Image: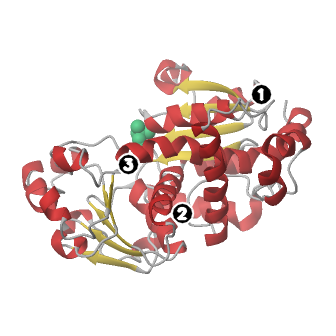
Amino acid sequence: MNALSLSTRLGTELHGGSGPRVGGLLNAPAREALGHLARETPASSRRHVLDLDDFSCEEIARVLDVAVEMKQRLVGRAERLSALGGELVANVFYEPSTRTRVSFELAAKALGADVINFNASASSVEKGETLLDTVRTLQAMGVSTLVMRHREAGAPYLVASRLGVRVVNAGDGCHAHPTQALLDLFTIRGRFGRLAGLRVAIVGDILHSRVARSNLWGLSKVGAEVVVCGPPTLLPASPMQDRLFPWNVRLEHRLEAALEGADVVIALRLQRERQEAGLLPSVREYTTHYGITPERLRLAQPDALLMHPGPVNEGVEISADATHGPLSAIDEQVSNGVAVRMGLLYLLCADSTSAASGASR
Ligand code: CP
């Protein structure tokens, strides 16, 4: 069984109801802190965020709506909220990250949580400590929410199914990156005022991209029309392959055909290991056929959005002038990441902060 099918199996077990769930109305400090939003927005009934494949369209909309309120607070530089007071959030990263780790830290702190940053390469993991031992240790010190990035697909599912902490997947191997997809949806909705019916082209290494997979689930749920484009060696044989992709996705090998009339173009990071693995003749050839340039973007809608999860290999997947050009929403994606992660943490954790202080500390 490969790593992706392992994670799918673990996910099925998890979402089959074996994991504990929280729900109900928000606690009193949270209600007070967010006023009308809290009155109108019941807390999430989910405990973990592992991918978007088990999110409904309504649940995605709820996260984005709360994120709008969070963004207004950030722009207005309002005082910190106390909705997550007493919550101890651990950013546990077994792979490098700039955007995701920092934005989760800012988001949790802005909601009043305490945050620790755990860097696996500077920890007892180097002495052979296992993943479950590490998380158990953090849990024994009061951590109730784990934001976790791991090179192995399925690792967050393993922790969620074995231990009592709440798990938010911050990227697992080639499998999923749900909060990146949520911030991408937020950015697109913020520009167009809607998601349903938009034409979205995702270009690059679809097969190995956790960003692409989570976006495919999210975009499909909200009714966007999605085409994925890349060299045949970096595309799935069919959208249904291993049930890892939603069914209503079009495959396209020609970039020009994928860009034609697109409202949104999402370029993916090309990892140079793909060339070493023999999946690409050369990075230069990839850029020749699939690099996004201002000229090629003229095939898309005049007000199209150009997006990238970052970090961008400028001059490889996107030319420098397109990266910094008028259609680029790359910096906006990064800014929106804080508000979206605030919205998500708020919906996940705010209800249980008072209960957690008695139950798990
Ligand atoms: N988009 C993304 O996951 O970026 P980082 O690796 O910097 O977190």
| Residue pointed to by mark 3 | 309
Is there a contact, CB below 8 Å, between mark 1 and mark 3?
Answer: no
| Residue pointed to by mark 1 | 142
**Mark 2 and mark 3: span between their CA atoms?**
23 Å
**Mark 2 or mark 3: which is in front?**
3
| Residue pointed to by mark 2 | 8
Q: Ligand 1: which quarter?
A: top left
Disc 2: CA contacts within 10 A as few (<14), some (14-19) or many (>=20): some
- Image position of 182 (left or right of 73): left
Given the image, on which type of amino acid does mark 3 rest?
A: Pro
Q: Quadrant of residue 53?
A: bottom right
| Mark 1: secondary structure | loop
Disc 1: CA contacts within 10 A as few (<14), some (14-19) or many (>=20): some
Front one among 209 and 138: 209
Question: Counting residues from the N terminus, which is met first, the one under dot 1 or under dot 3?
Answer: 1
Given the image, on which type of amino acid does mark 2 rest?
A: Thr
Any part of residue 180 in sight = yes
Question: Counting residues from the N terminus, which is met first, the one under dot 1 or under dot 2?
Answer: 2
Residue at the far front: name it: 76
Q: Name the residue: 65% across, 40% down.
A: 73
- Image position of 197 (left or right of 135): left
Residue 318 coordinates in the image, percent (x, y): 20, 50
Question: Counting residues from the N terminus, which is met first, the one under dot 2 or under dot 3?
Answer: 2
- Quarter of the figure with the C terminus: top right
For the image, the number of numbered tags is: 3
